[in-house]
Image: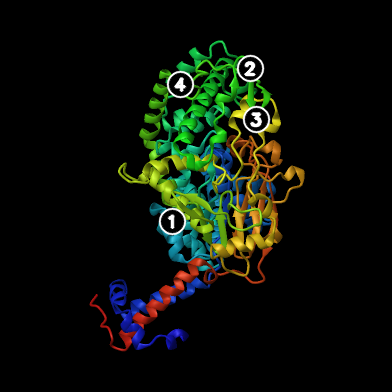
Amino acid sequence: MKDYKQITTETIRQDSRYLDLLSHNFPTIADASTEIINLEAILNLPKGTEHFLADLHGEYEAFQHVLRNASGSIKRKVNEIFGNTLREMEKKELCTLIYYPEQKLQLVKEKETDLEDWYVITLNQLVKVCQNVSSKYTRSKVRKALPKEFSYIIQELLHESSMDPNKQAYINVIISTIIDTDRADDFITALCKLIQRLTIDSLHILGDIFDRGPGPHIIMDTLCNYHNFDIQWGNHDILWMGAAAGNDCNIANVLRMAMRYGNLSAIEDGYGINLLPLATFAMETYADDPCEFFQPKIDKASSPYTEKTIRLIAQMHKAITVIQLKLEAETIKRRPEFEMEDRLLLHHIDFKKKAFTLGGKDYEMRDCYFPTVNPEDPYRLTEEEQEIVSKLHHSFVSSEKLKKHMKCLFRYGCMYNVCNSNLLFHASMPLNEDGTLKEVEILGEKYKGRNLLERVGQLIRTAYFAENDNPEKDFAVDFVWYLWCGKNSPAFDKSKMATFERYFLTDKETHREIKGHYYELRDREDICDMIMDEFGVEGEHRHIINGHVPVKAVKGEKPIKANGKLMVIDGGFSKAYQPETGIAGYTLVYHSRGFELVQHEPFTSTQKAIEEGIDIKSTTQIVELSSKRMMVKDTDKGKELMVQINDLKKLLLAYQNGLMKERAV
């Protein structure tokens, strides 16, 4: 109560209206003092463990496994707790049970000869693990995380010591009764999920949940039910948000990416988008076209698709690509302020010479079959194409599952976040060549740095939520497409998106996309400090954490840059990137003792993880260790709690000095 000297009668009177409201929750001296004691105690607990993941790209199996094993943390805890008292195989079996309780229980019951004995041993082991992972939290926080049906029993087991002979019989009876009443399976499942939940206190997703992989909708289902998380939107997320808002350019890009990586299940099964009109059109229009350069990027040996289906996907891929180029041209002409006239390319095709002519130079075209492009008016959609666009538009804006996931993205997401002295954003901070913040003009106003990201976030929300009579609505819908591919977009920040060139031109020099200055300057400590100052990031140990650009570990590239000020954690969750990166993703773990970077090898499958206990092989690198353990009082949450404590002290003094009366209970 040493802060009482700072609280005067005058400050209490100034805050009398607020204190009157606060007194409804804490009506007596006893209530106020009890809450102060509780909050002071919380401040002196170790900070919860934060996990940072980026660029999941629909790889739901690997993502879910990393959540279930807490990036290897649960395995380490099992090793710490049981050391040499369990064989390696027994520890592996216990870990697999914790990760996949329902599935593992089925396998155990098929082969276990003395199931009751196994239940007794396993329940005791799980209680020990649960006691360990819950030790850094208050009883109140643990209680809130407990499943209701087993809340009382788990509390008894967690807070009673089996070392006390007077309590051993009590604990044994609880466990035997659980087994006798046929509740062991449900209880084990509840304990395992509680361990998973308590091992990760908060989860930060640094963008790109969508595209490339087969299950972005499954990842979103997982996140929508997760206990504590936030999202910093990536360019692929924004692409989907624009599609859900009804931007036809975004819709075409979403579908093109799905065709490119052969992930139609997310579109059709995940979100109920009807692709039949596009498929029918593509089969007829490109019946005589081999669509050689539109083959999906899949492993045909392990793919569920037949040759006939792969052929159809290639045809659909080309059809939607041509439609996309036409739709984007409409937006570019409508929005000269986007300064993207250099992306109007179809009129540069010389159909007679089968060449692309630009700047007086002819470029060889590897594909010059465009049955729907009129050389006299190359950007006009045919009637059939327009009808397809209308039907796809309706499917996207009407999808209930997509609406649910967009609501989640908007509720828990933003362009950036500042949390515990860490600045999180997905891709880039537009910079000038000299390292100063680049001004970007939006609707006649110039924005840079923090103001730019906040304005961009506002426009994304306007595009999705605003009514049609909102004067910014139309611009915002167009702008969400610009964020996907515009050179000054903080989610993209490259000279161009060379979609046309990559598909149709043989000269690879035309495929080059020159990155913005941020990507070359972010290795400098002074640049990172300048950006963090712009966002008001404080603290002795402060960092920028990014995703977006895969770290090519196989070529020796390091994810830690700028003398530890910047961490890039896109390590290639997407299978399409793994040949480039040589790994399969990073998890950055921030616990009470500092930062650890966990580097993952490719995940085999959930089935092998369950049946054979094959875990993701991970390598942990210590990034930064604190000289003293970080407590809750050292976090952003701690600052909030200290403000609450100060208000409660004012209320307590008001009661004690007679400035306010205690309320009748």
| Residue pointed to by mark 3 | 359
Q: First in sequence: mark 2 or mark 4?
A: 4
Q: Whole-Å distance between the Cαs marked 3 and 1?
A: 67 Å
**Residue 141: x and y, percent?**
45, 63
Tell whether 566 sits left or right of 318.
Answer: right
**Residue 402: x and y, percent?**
41, 37
Front residue of 121/286: it is 286
Q: Which mark is residue 354?
A: 2
Tell whether 526 sits left or right of 457.
Answer: right
List the single residue furthest toward the right.
556
Query: Type of residue at label 2?
Result: Lys
Query: What coloring was used for the rendering?
Result: rainbow
Q: Residues within 10 Å of mark 1 (few under 14, many from 20)?
A: some
List the single residue furthest toward the top.
288
Query: Type of residue at label 1?
Result: Leu
The quadrant holding residue 152 is: bottom left
Query: Type of residue at label 4?
Result: Leu
Local SS, label 4 = helix
Which part of the image, by quadrant, shows the N terminus?
Answer: bottom left
| Residue pointed to by mark 1 | 146
The quadrant holding residue 32 is: bottom left
Q: First in sequence: mark 3 or mark 1?
A: 1
Q: First in sequence: mark 1 or mark 4?
A: 1
The answer to the question of whether label 2 and label 4 lie on touching residues, with beta carbons closer than 8 A, is no
Local SS, label 3 = loop
Local SS, label 2 = loop
Which residue is at a point 48% across and 71% down the rendered structure image? Answer: 639
Q: Which mark is residue 264?
A: none
